[in-house]
Amino acid sequence: MRQAVLNLEESMIRQVANAGMGRDDVLKFWFGESDEVTPAFIRQAAADSLTSGETFYAHNLGLPELREEISRYCSALRTAGAAPVGVNRVAVTAGGVNALMLAVQALVNAGDRVVVVTPVWPNLTAQPAVMGAEVHCVSLRPVDGQWQLDMAELLAAITPATRLLVLNAPNNPTGWTLSRAEQQTLLAHCRRTGTWILADEVYERLYFEPTPNGCAPSFLDIADTQDRLVVVHSFSKSFLMTGWRLGWLVMPPDMTPHMGKLIEFNTSCSPVFVQRAGVVALQRTDEVTPRVVAHLKACRDTLVPLLQALPGVQLAPAAGGMYAFFRLTGRPEFQDSLATAKRLVGEAGLGLAPGAAFTNSTEPAEQGWLRWCFASQQPERLRQGVQRLAVWLAQNKPPAGL
């Protein structure tokens, strides 16, 4: 096999989940998904499609009806003066993961330099590595209780030799979000260097700060249609459709036909019945997404104060997404987040994702973090989880006098 593939690390999140699979006594907060099922009317649209016999191939770029709905949906979210998100810029994909991989396949050659802002969902550093790219990470830092980007460090890392900048905002796992001013600075800089921007904006609607359009700032609000920008979206989070594997790409119009060729050689197309569900989800988004966002904010506001009240917990509250990213201090062994997460499963019945899965850094300041997905239908489960963590921390206090 290719060395780049052999060098890939097994998912640390899966390692922790595998340790607790099949155990009913574990409170599971390790995966990034809600425990609420997809709304009935979305499921019914898929069922109706199957009943009517729609079991054949679709266009590589997606059903025309779905691409039109995506165009309308994206355009409705844009700020005044934004470039139109026409159908000729849209491709339907088999999930956000597939969308990201397609974009990387389209843009990255072996040996290219790719800059990624971390901590970040591990696929975003692994996918360029699969293509043989040189991946350079620039880390966010918790400052005064908030995650912040050192813009000077990032700009210095993006040179004319940088093929691609990868950003995820709102960010998984930290909840950090780019400001409009930061987006404008990065777009202007990447125009000068000729660097492509791959913006993972799947959490755009899961944003808790007040904005005129009810979502986080998007590069689509400020970029021209011909800018070297590819934006990734997904039905998974905002529409409670993680298992459906349906997403989309927005790109320069000239790139879209070529993306259709790549889709042909990857998946051919997304299943028609899944796309029919996507059409209905977008048409009735006001019945799903605002409720999801309100519930997630309530869950965040339940969990974060409880975690902050625990001794030895360092936490910067999330502005968006569905995660609390926190650090355990006080014991040297807590710096190994994978070992800590496995211990929490075995000793406390608490399933969290290890922070080491989201960063390639070995700096001590970036160790010891854990990710808690708070997308729970029952906030009481969050309280139970914090209680289990509190008991476990009390049992693992440093010996007196140390």
Image (tube, helix red, strand yellow):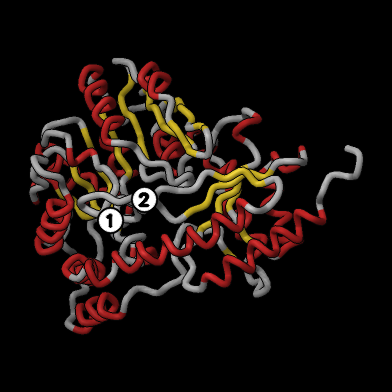
Label 1 crowd bin: few (<14), some (14–19), many (20+), radius 10 Å: many
Image quadrant where one finds the C terminus: top right
Which numbered disc, 2 or 1, marks the residue that appears first in the sequence? 2
Q: Amino acid at mark 2?
A: Val
Residue 175 seen in the figure: yes
Residue 81 in picture, x, y percent from top left: 8, 40
Q: Is residue 29 above or below residue 173?
A: below
Q: What residue does disc 1 label?
A: 247
Residue 68 in picture, x, y percent from top left: 10, 58
Q: What residue does disc 2 label?
A: 97
Q: Is residue 239 above or below residue 183?
A: below
Residue 257 in picture, x, y percent from top left: 12, 43
Q: Is residue 15 left or right of residue 210?
A: right
Q: Residue furthest bottom?
A: 51
Q: Quadrant of residue 231?
A: top left
Q: Secondary structure at mark 2?
A: helix
Q: Amino acid at mark 1?
A: Gly
Q: Is label 2 in contact with label 1 (beta carbons under 8 Å)?
A: yes
Q: Secondary structure at mark 1?
A: strand
Whole-angstrom CA distance, mark 2 to mark 1, is 8 Å
